[in-house]
Amino acid sequence: MTLLELQEVTKEYPVRLRKGKKNVIAVNQVNLILHEGESLALVGESGSGKSTIARLITNIESITSGQILLDGKSIHRKDLKYYHLYKNIQLVLQDSATSLHPKMTVQEIITEPIRNFFPNEKNWNDICVQLLTLVGLDATFLTRYAHQLSGGQKQRVCMAKALAVQPKLIIFDESIASLDRLSQIAIIKMLKSIQVQEQITYLFITHDLQSAKHLCNRVAVMQEGKIVEIFSDWDEEKLKHPYTKLLFRHSQ
């Protein structure tokens, strides 16, 4: 069943030039479907438009043209409350440090969205412990601050915070790119386990095909604002686009 659909989505940015203005196309008529419960990787080099897609889906930025549908309804319609979008779609960024308040403990960080979305919930401490356990941490982390965490631990806390609102979709925008390979492998294993338990859909934005291979069912390859190929078979002979083949070879 389709959870999220991008239909001919385009995003343009105005750029000032000496002789006037010009529109730069960051995302160019992108069509993309995410099915419930799947992991879809969005792969491409820096500047290809991947992070712009994430900002458009989360409505941080508005689209220039096209449509983005969540459960068949436009996320850009005027009557849509931000509460509904935030509840269903969570974004985990690469720089976990900017996502964690330096003066809040891990417990306060995770509890904040629970208080906002489930105000009648009283067992906040138990839920925090459950969420930490889900991301591979324990109750001893509840009283820690961001500066007391490693890079991998910070990302796990960010993921626990995202899971706290029980979203349908989590977007990971280069979320493990800054971690060492062992930490990346551990978090990918954790994400696969969480997905089975929670039935969450993932959009995994990355430049690393190897990470995508271990986590995702399908891969959408993006180049210069366009989706140039979508594949699920990791046989190089079956790949069609030259850019996809180039990425594939560089990942070996």
Image (tube, helix red, strand yellow):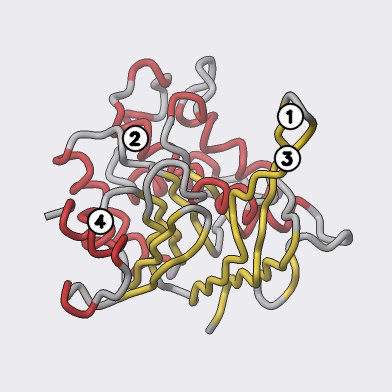
Question: Observer-nearest residue: 37 or 193?
Answer: 37
Position of residue 161 measured from the top left corner of the image (x, y, whole percent): 50, 42
How far apart in space, not on screen, are marks 4 and 2 (Cα)? 41 Å
Is 181 rendered above or below residue 212? Answer: above
User: What residue is shown with label 4?
Assistant: 247
**Disc 1 to disc 3, C-alpha distance:** 6 Å
Q: Which label sits in the foreground, 2 or 3?
A: 3
The percent position of residue 58, horizontal first and vertical second, equals 64, 51
N-terminal-most mark, 1 or 2: 1
Q: Earlier in the sequence, mark 1 or mark 3?
A: 1
Q: Position of residue 177 (x, y in %)?
A: 31, 39
Residue type marked 3: Lys
Query: Which label lies toward us, 1 or 2?
Result: 1
Judged by depth in the image, the label closer to the viewer, 4 or 2, is 4
Label 2 vs 3, first from the N-terminus: 3
The crowd level at tag 3 (other Cα within 10 Å; few <14, some 14-19, many 20+) is few
Cα distance between the residues tagged 2 and 3: 53 Å
Q: Is residue 24 above or below residue 103?
A: below
- Determine whether the residue tagged by mark 3 lies in a helix, strand or loop: strand
Q: Quadrant for residue 219, please give it.
A: bottom left
What residue is at 44 percent from the left and 49 percent from the top? 172
Q: Which mark is residue 209?
A: none
Label 2–label 3 contact, CB within 8 A? no
What residue sits right under mark 1 in the picture?
A: 16
Q: Amino acid at mark 1?
A: Arg
